[in-house]
Image (cartoon, rainbow, N blue to C red):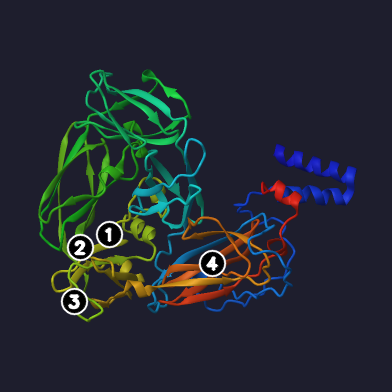
């Protein structure tokens, strides 16, 4: 509120002193000082030729396809290598629907729920960018790996919402582990600087105040073991909100987010973790049904009771989910909290009966439970290669279009349940098996099959892949694979009227390429795009030139689109404007 009043007062003073021309200068200065990466849409646009669009008709997912009319502006003579354009054109393309197969009406695009974004940077102590990798270790995006560009920037725009644990690794510099919360249609920042680390000391005790010897403390991805006095020590920990997990056999595992200041030091008596006696659980499966091992998932039943002193977010559920159980076998799980849990068992080609079981766990005691399986409706089929012969040991996936909804639905939880704890996608959302020696497979037909799911397969060497849509009633299917190399295409973005270089930043599925200056007379070409339907967003100085434009990429072909640039992106900026933008 104070900022708005100050700004209004300054505008009034400018009007009184300099009139309209001064006001125009003032507002122009605010605009010119905007960040090159600005996401603001409400900024006053540069004057230029208008964008002419063809009204969308019957396009999927409510996204408009737009045909842009190229500019007819005259072309002055300026050397190709020179540019007076201070601000980059930001181009982002995101995959909406994979594959060249014919979509089924009423079935949402694969990955419909994957629209959360992350963006950030990984920097060295001197502030320079690092060639780091960001790996999603736990949560709905487990297995996804992002890479930094030459400036240390990274990003993704097709992630699933929910809590995730990510590992940031910069070879030869450092490693960090963070917990991030991703939200649909929102962007989560994650910036890590390997400079001015903090030092951390602490102690692990039991509930009587006695030190616990030999406890493992994991802090920001590093590990330390407590000594005879229960003390642990980390000489260097990257600053920020770091994840701490404490374990010791016989005690309940504990998790906490610890905030560390750059260059700070936490003394032993300022950080204490108190572990409680653990509950343990023996789980057995009576029937031998389906194929492969069963997967057991465990969740707090209805949230944690307040009187336990252990909140829902203080136990690392990702450490026990999932637990693999051999067919007709058993497993013992230790380190559990004193609470009631919900057990959900999944088995390819079978289903749990009942689907969910509640079990009370008690501190310091071992409980046992026998789970049951029953035959279930299945999707059976065969995978054949390009030669028409069955493919053995092919990786087969059955995936719901919206994984998060398919996961929370089977748990009978609200759709935002995955924003309360680290929740991986359950097999009701994503199943995976291997074909046998005859190329055959069997997968459980969960309720989500009624709405349509995607069946895909890939050879072990990754050279052949295929996808089709499976709906209710399909019990026997044949999936033909195609060469992966033929499934890639490209996009050429034509921008008429350019007579000088144009700074361009490109992001593909949120992952940034190195910034470039596109010479005059050269079109922007994006190569190695997966075949399917893509979405294009382009903006300059915070103004969207095109938003949510769909285009198709066909195997071995290059699509072409025309983009109208505003006058400022063509003619450039004055020397004073470039100076204020930090350009020489």
Residue at horizontal 78 percent and vertical 43 percent from the top: 8
**Which of marks 2 and 3 precedes in the sequence?**
2
* Residue at (72, 68) in percent of width and height: 77
> How many numbered marks are there?
4
Instruction: Classify mark 1: helix, strand or loop.
Output: loop
Q: Residue at x 21, y 35 (%)?
A: 279
- Mark 2 or mark 1, which is nearer the start of the sequence? 2
Disc 3 to disc 4, C-alpha distance = 38 Å
Disc 3 to disc 2, C-alpha distance = 21 Å
Of the numbered discs 3 and 1, the one sitting upstream in the chain is 3
Query: Pointer 1: what residue?
Result: 427
Q: Which of the two labelled residues, at mark 3 and mark 4, occupies the earlier sequence position?
A: 3
Question: Residue 464 at what x, y percent from top left?
Answer: 28, 72
Q: Residue 220's image quarter?
A: top left
**Decide: marks 1, 2 in contact (CB < 8 A)?**
yes
Q: Which residue is mark 2?
A: 348
């Amino acid at each position: 509120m104070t900022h708005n009043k100050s700004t209004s007062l300054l505008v009034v003073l400018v009007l009184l002193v300099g009139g309209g021309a001064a006001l125009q200068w003032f507002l122009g200065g605010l605009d010119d000082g905007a960040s090159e990466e600005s996401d603001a849409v409400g900024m006053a646009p540069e004057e230029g030729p208008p964008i002419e669009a063809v009204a969308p008709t019957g396009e999927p997912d409510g996204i408009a396809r737009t045909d842009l009319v190229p500019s007819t502006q005259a072309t002055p003579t300026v050397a190709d290598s020179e540019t007076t354009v201070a601000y980059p054109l930001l181009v982002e393309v995101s995959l909406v629907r994979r594959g060249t197969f014919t979509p089924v009406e009423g079935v949402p695009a694969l990955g419909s729920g994957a629209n959360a974004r992350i963006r950030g940077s990984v920097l060295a102590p001197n502030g320079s960018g690092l060639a780091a990798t960001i790996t999603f270790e736990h949560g709905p995006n487990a297995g996804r790996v992002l890479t930094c560009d030459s400036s240390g920037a990274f990003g993704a725009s097709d992630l699933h919402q929910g809590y995730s644990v990510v590992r940031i690794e910069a070879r030869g510099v450092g490693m960090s582990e963070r917990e991030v919360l991703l939200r649909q249609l929102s962007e989560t920042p994650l910036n890590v600087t390997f400079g001015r680390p903090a030092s951390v000391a602490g102690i692990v005790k039991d509930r009587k105040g006695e030190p616990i010897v030999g406890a493992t403390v994991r802090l920001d991805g590093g590990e330390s073991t407590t000594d005879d006095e229960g003390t642990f020590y980390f000489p260097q920990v990257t600053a920020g909100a770091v994840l701490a997990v404490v374990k010791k056999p016989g005690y309940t595992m504990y998790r906490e987010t610890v905030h560390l200041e750059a260059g700070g030091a936490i003394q032993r008596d300022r950080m204490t973790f108190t572990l409680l006696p653990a509950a343990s659980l023996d789980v057995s499966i009576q029937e031998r049904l389906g194929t492969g091992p069963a997967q057991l998932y465990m969740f707090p039943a209805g949230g944690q009771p307040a009187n336990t002193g252990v909140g829902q977010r203080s136990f690392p559920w990702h450490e026990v989910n999932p637990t693999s159980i051999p067919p007709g076998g058993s497993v013992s799980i230790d380190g559990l909290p004193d609470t009631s849990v919900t057990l959900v068992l999944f088995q390819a080609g079978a289903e749990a009966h009942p689907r969910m079981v509640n079990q009370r766990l008690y501190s310091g005691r071992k409980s046992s439970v026998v789970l049951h399986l029953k035959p279930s409706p299945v999707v059976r089929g065969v995978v054949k290669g390009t030669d028409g012969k069955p493919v053995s040991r092919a990786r087969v996936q059955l995936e719901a279009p919206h994984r998060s909804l398919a996961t929370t639905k089977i748990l009978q939880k609200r759709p935002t349940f995955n924003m309360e704890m680290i929740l991986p996608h359950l097999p009701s959302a994503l199943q995976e098996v291997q074909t046998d020696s005859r190329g055959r497979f069997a997968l459980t037909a969960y309720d989500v099959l009624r709405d349509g799911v995607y069946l895909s397969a890939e050879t072990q060497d990754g050279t052949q892949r295929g996808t089709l849509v499976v709906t209710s009633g399909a019990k026997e299917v044949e999936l033909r694979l195609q060469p992966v190399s033929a499934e890639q295409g490209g996009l050429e973005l034509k921008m008429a009227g350019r007579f000088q270089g144009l700074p361009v930043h490109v992001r593909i599925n949120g992952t940034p390429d190195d910034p470039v200056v596109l010479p005059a007379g050269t079109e922007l070409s994006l190569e190695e795009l997966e075949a399917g339907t893509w979405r294009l967003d382009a903006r300059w100085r915070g103004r969207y030139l095109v938003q949510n434009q769909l285009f198709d990429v066909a195997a071995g072909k290059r699509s072409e689109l025309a983009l109208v640039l505003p006058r400022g992106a063509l003619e450039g900026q004055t020397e004073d404007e470039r100076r204020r933008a930090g350009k020489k």
